[in-house]
Image (tube, rainbow, N blue to C red):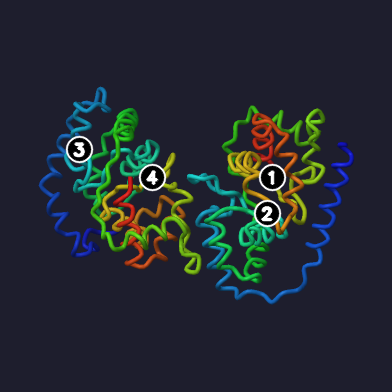
Amino acid sequence: MPGISQFSNGRRYQVTGFASLKLVITAAVCSATFVVAGRAESPAVHNCTWCHSTQGVAPAPRLAGQTYQYLENQLADFRTHRRDNPLSIQYMWDATANLSTQSTRDLAMYFSRMPPKAAGDGDAELVAMGKKIYQEGLPDSNIVACVVCHGPNAEGVGQIPRLSGLASSYLKRRLEQWGQGYHAAAGPPMPDIARKLSPEQMEAIASYLSFIR
Amino acid sequence: MSSLKLILQIAILTVALAGAAAADERPAAPKASVQAKLSYCKDCHGPSAQGYFGFFPIPRLAGQQTAYLENQLRAFLEHRRTNNVMFNVAHALSPEMMAALALSLHQLNPLPIGGAPRQLAAEGKRIFEDGVPDANVAACAACHGPEATGTGEIPRLAGQLYPYVVKELTNWGIERGQNAAKPDTSAVMSPVAHSLSKSQIEAVAAFVSYLK
C-alpha cells in the first residue's frame, strides 16, 4: 500500500493544512443521520463542502458540475478502497465509510447539478501547448487526444469525468499519480496514458483545463 | 432502376476488392514500435480493441478486416473521411505500420461490449437479412456477409458499437467520400444510408452490435 511518505514536498503543506479538519469531518460523517443527503442544508452536504467548498477553487477538488455517474463511482471506490491515492486514504476512506447507497446517489446528484466554475490557477503560458495535446494528442509520442473521451469542452459524460475548470494542481497530481500506479483498480486507459506524459506536458494539460468551463 | 443500381454497386465493389487483393509484399515494421503503437490504439479503442463509449463512440477494431482498416487509415490521411483526431493519428503512421496494426487488430476476438436496446434487434435482423425492398435498400448480409464479418474493404459489423453505427449511417454523406478527387468504395453505402429511416438505422445498429 502506497504511503503518504511518497508525497512530493510540494504537497506536504496541503496535507498539514487539512489535518485539523480530518477529525471534524470523520466525527461529523460518522455521527450524522442522513435522511435526505442531497440538500444544501443537509449535514451530508456540509461534510463535503468543508473541504470541497460549494464553488470555485477549494483545497479539495471542485465537485460542482461533475458528472453524476463519475461522482457515484468515486464515492463507491473510496468506500471500497479501490481508489487508493494518498489523500483519498487520508480523508475520503473515512468520509465515505458510513455512506449509504441512497446518500451516495443523493450527494452525487446534488453536486452534479451545481454550475461549474473555472479554477483558473494554471500557468497561462502553457495553455496553448495544453490545448493542443488535449484536442489533438501527440501521435508521434503515442499520446491520445483527451477530447475523444472527455469531450470538446472537457465536460465529461457518464462515468467519464468533467475536467474543465478543475484546479490545475489537482489535475496535475492525478496525472502524476496515475503514472505512479495509484488507483490502478480503475483500469485502463488512464494509467497507460499518464505514464507517457512528461511533467511539462502534464502541467500544460492541467493549466489549459483549469481555464476552460 | 433498382437492378441497374445494384449492378453499379457490384461493379464498384469488384474493382475495389481486386485492388485490395493486389496488395504486394511490404517490409515489416519493427516489433517493439508496433506493440507501442498498438497500445496507443487501445488507449482509446479499448484494451481488447472492443470499442469504448467515450464522449464520442469509439469503434470496435477487433476482428475488423485488414483491407478495411488500412483503407480507412488512408481515407483519414487523404481527406476522404473527415475526422480531425484520426487524421492526426494516421499522419504519424507509415504504410508498414498501418499494415502491421491492421493485422494485429484483425486477430483480436473479444466479446461484443453490448449496451444496445435489445428490443430493436428483431427488426434489425429482418433489415439485415432481407433489406427494405420498399425503400430500395438491399440486404446488408448481401455484402457484409451472413455473419456480418465483412470481407476486404467491406467492414465487419459484428460486435460494432451501437452508437457508432448509428452515427456513421446518419452522417454518411458528410463524413465519408469527402474528397471529390478521390472517389472510394464509401459511395456504395451512400444511397443505403440515405434511404434508411432513423428507426431502421437504430434497429440494424442494435442487431449487429450483439453479433459475435
Residues at marks 2 and 3, CA–CA distance in whole angstroms: 48 Å
Residues at marks 1 and 3, CA–CA distance in whole angstroms: 48 Å
Asked whether A31 or B166 is in front, the reply is B166
Q: Is residue B113 left or right of residue A150?
A: right
Do tag 2 and tag 3 residues touch (Cβ < 8 Å)? Answer: no
Amino acid carrying mark 4 in the image: Pro
Q: Label 4, on which residue?
A: A161
The image shows residue A51, relative to residue B88, as above or below, that is above
Q: Secondary structure at mark 4?
A: loop
Do tag 1 and tag 2 residues touch (Cβ < 8 Å)? Answer: yes
Please, which chain is the residue tagged with disc 4 on? Answer: A
> Residue A68, position in %: x, y?
37, 36
> Residue A7, position in %: x, y?
23, 62
| Of pointers 3 and 4, the one earlier in the residue sequence | 3
Please, which chain is the residue tagged with disc 3 on? Answer: A
Please, which chain is the residue tagged with disc 1 on? Answer: B
Q: Label 2, on which residue?
A: B63
The image shows residue A26, relative to residue B156, as above or below, that is above
> Residue B65, position in %: x, y?
71, 56
> Count the marks: how many?
4
Please, which chain is the residue tagged with disc 2 on? Answer: B
Tell me the quarter of the image containing the N terminus of chain A.
bottom left
Q: Label 3, on which residue?
A: A49
Q: Secondary structure at mark 2?
A: loop
Q: Is residue A124 left or right of residue A163?
A: left
Q: Are marks 1 and 2 on the same chain?
A: yes
